[in-house]
């Protein structure tokens, strides 16, 4: 009778040990999952920021057009200054 009880206790101890090991593995997996979720959220945020910056960044055509417009404005200002100088 005592032998049977000892066997049951030993089996329960083995099962408890296995359960403890599985729980520890589950906790490690949960920690890894949480870390990966945080990294994923950070990467998504960086992607959105980069995508927005790319959208707002001027293209080569925009830079050229802006330079042409500025050159035209400077010529007009120079013309106005020269006209004012002549009238004095």
Image (cartoon, rainbow, N blue to C red):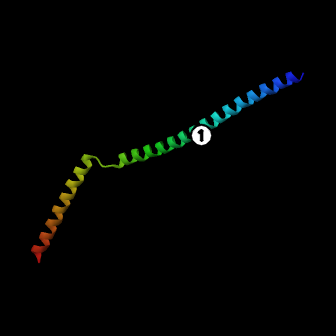
Of residues 53 and 41, the one nearer the viewer is 41
**Left or right side of 45 for 72:** left
The quarter in which the C terminus is drawn is bottom left
**Residue 12 lies in what quarter of the image?**
top right
The quarter in which the N terminus is drawn is top right
Which residue is denoted by mark 1 in the rendering?
A: 31
Question: SS class of the residue under badge 1?
Answer: helix
Q: Give the x, y percent position of residue 44.
A: 47, 42
Q: Residue at x 24, y 46 (%)?
A: 61
Q: Give the x, y percent position of residue 33.
A: 57, 37
Location of residue 69 with respect to 2 vertically, above or below: below
Of residues 52 and 77, the one nearer the viewer is 52
Location of residue 38 with respect to 1 vertically, above or below: below
**Left or right side of 56 for 14:** right
Of residues 38 and 77, the one nearer the viewer is 38
Residue at the bottom extreme of this rendering = 88
- Figure label count: 1
Residue at the left extreme of this rendering = 86
Location of residue 78 with respect to 37 vertically, above or below: below
Q: Give the x, y percent position of residue 86.
A: 9, 73
How would you rate the neighbour count of disc 1 (Cα within 10 Å): few for under 14, some for 14-19, many for 20 or more?
few
**Left or right side of 86 for 11:** right
Q: Give the x, y percent position of residue 34.
A: 58, 41
Q: Residue at x 12, y 70 (%)?
A: 83
**Left or right side of 53 for 77:** left
Q: Residue at x 12, y 74 (%)?
A: 85
Q: Residue at x 50, y 42 (%)?
A: 39
Residue at the right extreme of this rendering = 1
Of residues 14 and 82, the one nearer the viewer is 14
**Residue 2 lies in what quarter of the image?**
top right
């Amino acid at each position: 009778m005592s032998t049977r009880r000892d066997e049951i206790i030993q089996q329960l101890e083995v099962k408890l040990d296995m359960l403890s090991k599985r729980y520890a593995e589950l906790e490690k997996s949960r920690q890894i999952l949480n870390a990966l979720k945080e990294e994923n959220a950070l990467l998504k945020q960086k992607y959105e920021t980069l995508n927005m910056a790319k959208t707002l960044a001027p293209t080569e055509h925009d830079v050229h057009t802006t330079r042409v417009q500025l050159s035209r404005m400077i010529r007009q200002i120079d013309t106005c200054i020269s006209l004012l100088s002549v009238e004095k």
